[in-house]
Image (cartoon, helix red, strand yellow):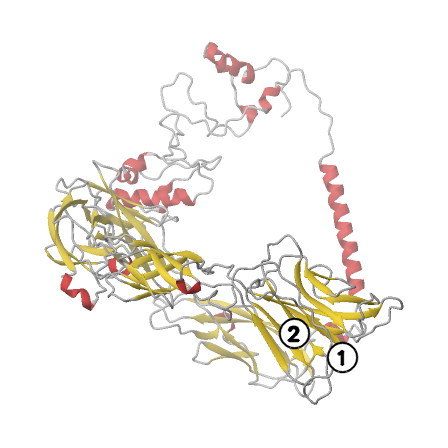
Amino acid sequence: MWTSGRMSNAKSWLGLGMSLYFWGLMDLTTTVLSGTPTPPGKLEAFLSDKPQSHSRTKRSWVWNQFFVLEEYTGTDPLYVGKLHSDMDRGDGSIKYILSGEGAGVVFTIDDTTGDIHAIQRLDREERAQYTLRAQALDRRTGRPMEPESEFIIKIQDINDNEPKFLDGPYIATVPEMSPVGTSVIQVTATDADDPTYGNSARVMYSILQGQPYFSVDSKTGVIRTALMNMDREAKEYYEVIIQAKDMGGQLGGLAGTTTVNITLSDVNDNPPRFPQKHYQMSVLESAPVSSTVGRVFAKDLDEGINAEMKYTIVDGDGADAFDINTDPNFQVGIITVKKPLSFETKKSYTLKVEGANPHLEMRFLNLGPFQDTTTVHISVEDVDEPPVFEPGFYFVEVPEDVAIGTTIQIISAKDPDVTNNSIRYSIDRSSDPGRFFYVDITTGALMTARPLDREEFSWHNITVLAMEMNNPSQVGSVPVTIKVLDVNDNAPKFPRFYEAFVCENAKAGQLIQTVSAVDQDDPRDGQHFYYSLAPEAANNPNFTVRDNQDNTARILTRRSGFRQQEQSVFHLPILVSDNGQPALSSTGTLTVQVCSCDDDGHVLSCSPEAYMLPVRLSRGALIAILACIFVLLVLVLLILSMRRHRKQPYIIDDEENIHENIVRYDDEGGGEEDTEAFDIAAMWNPREAQVGGASKTRQDMLPEIESLSRYVPQTCAVNSTVHSYVLAKLYEADMDLWAAPFDSLQTYMFEGDGSVAGSLSSLQSAASDSEQSFDFLTDWGPRFRKLAELYGASEGPTPLW
């Protein structure tokens, strides 16, 4: 039977306890407490073989745990206890073995005596107990003498850990002006010692720094305000040091500290105030709407939502001309332009601006009022403004058949400045890329410059510019919307090619096709078309047209008995007219094929060759035939081209002057009296051009540039303005793709009279080169010597042309 023993001096152990259990009879617990530790003595428990005083059979001692103090600092191993078996007779035949947690590392056992020692420093906060197993073996045979038993070694606590604030340092916030006793935060300290043993883990709190503003509850660690009317604007941050001490705060206890950073949060206890009671600002009269004029600021010592400001204009003669908004980032009032300003109309304004807190706290209203006012004087400065159009928008309706040069609207602008400078008008060409319109530079008369076509462009949106003569940088603009009104200038026509068929067994009055028409015009009363046979087919014996009165028509047969062999295709001309003023019409053709059909009207064949060709050629055969034809055509074209470009022998006659092959005068540009092709006088005096009679016409060639005046009747040119006449000529020049791209083009084709050389032009000359004689060139002097050599008479044979 296992027994255990421990020698103990009651005065040498602090907090030593050992429990011994008597098997089957009683439980015995012995706790030994002492003050200052001294080296342990020895205690042995032996089994007794003698009978006890009671009547029961003797039993051996039963054990299961040891106690040992932590943090032993001695140099010798710490004695824990002794194991003994009742089989041990003291002769060393029994061998004790220790196993389990810490065996051989933390605890060792004397295998002969059974003494257990701790060979390492023990810490209860790291490990509170160890579970080990003991066994007694026969030293000679190694046979177990006793069953293996388990026991516990418990580590007894001492006050070796100070309280610690595991969550520190702390950060807390409390509103300013809070009442005394307002809870701020609770701090908690933790002591690692055993709370069930003595006062080692009993913690008390105290404040070391932060008085008289704050206090702390000694038991709970709750920090509260201790001073009333703490003002954030005076002091915002506080550093409070809290101490936690164990042993109930008694002398000798261990202590720990933490820091609590307390911030006073803001409340709205300060009203806003303007540091300036008068503001002076200026703004240009050209400042656009919503542009900034200036800023005002009402100072508020609070922060965040309590410092938010709302600015309003409460009085003054500029309330309708200016507006004020609050900048949410800087809490300033931004004064902006509300409507266009004019120095000529009003030169200065006065505003009364109020700044107020929108978020108020009822308990601080006695510190108010939470609003303030200031006066703002704004001066309007004069600037050179661009011309202003009145009205600011033009809408014009014009028929599409209006003549070129017709004035459709007078655009008017004026200089708003006192100087009232002269204005010149123009059109922004980016808004009129087609150059359909022209504006008079001085009067602002808007005229057409090209024919208008509603079907091409039904709307024109142009921008007319007005520029000051004295300051070209000042330019005003106005939008002009032009709606082109429709006139009946497009005849209705078929939207597609109509093709129908009629069966050979068709009866009279049978419907073969329904046709419709389209018209690009858009009359106000809507489209209405009338259908009939063309005059040349009015008495058509085969087909007739029935108008459905809904802009469609039916094509009906007038007889029966159609035959493919007689006529396989009919072309029926149909006349379509509209309801415009004047009415326009066009003729469309309906192609009708005669087909053979079955009794149900299903087409069998529409080709008369079907009766003669029993077998149809395959697609492959047709492709082969076409390919052969194409190859033959290419060969023929190649042969013809080679023959055309075949080189011919060229023999140069000694008397032949080869320069004649490279000199050619297409347009000599002669003197002022050549009016064969173009009479420039018509540009300057149209009336004289008419009186002078018909102009001469060149017989040998057409002029390179035809006169633009031929498109405009001269009577119209005489009676109309110069602008209309020039616009018509400009339009014709623009439409001439072969004209030179010059703004001003003058063609001189008259060489003049009185010249010694006479006319150099070949116009009106003889038709045959052989009839011309150039011998007179030799009499003109040195300047014409080269021409005389080129075209003079030669004594040799006549050259080949």
The answer to whether any part of residue 37 appears in the image is yes
Q: Amino acid at mark 2?
A: Gln
| Percent x, y of residue 499 | 59, 72
Image quadrant in which the N terminus is located? bottom right
- Looking at marks 2 and 1 on the same chain, the residue that comes earlier in the sequence is marked by 1
Q: Is residue 396 left or right of residue 100?
A: left
Q: Which residue is mark 2?
A: 567
What label does residue 493 carry, if any? none
Which label lies toward us, 2 or 1?
1
| Percent x, y of residue 796 | 63, 14
Q: Which residue is mark 1?
A: 49
The residue shown at (89%, 66%) is: 140
| Percent x, y of residue 694 | 35, 39
User: Callout 2 environment at 10 Å: few (<14), some (14 to 19), or many (20+)?
Assistant: few
Quarter holding residue 443: top left
The secondary structure type at the circle numbered 2 is loop
Q: Amino acid at mark 1?
A: Asp
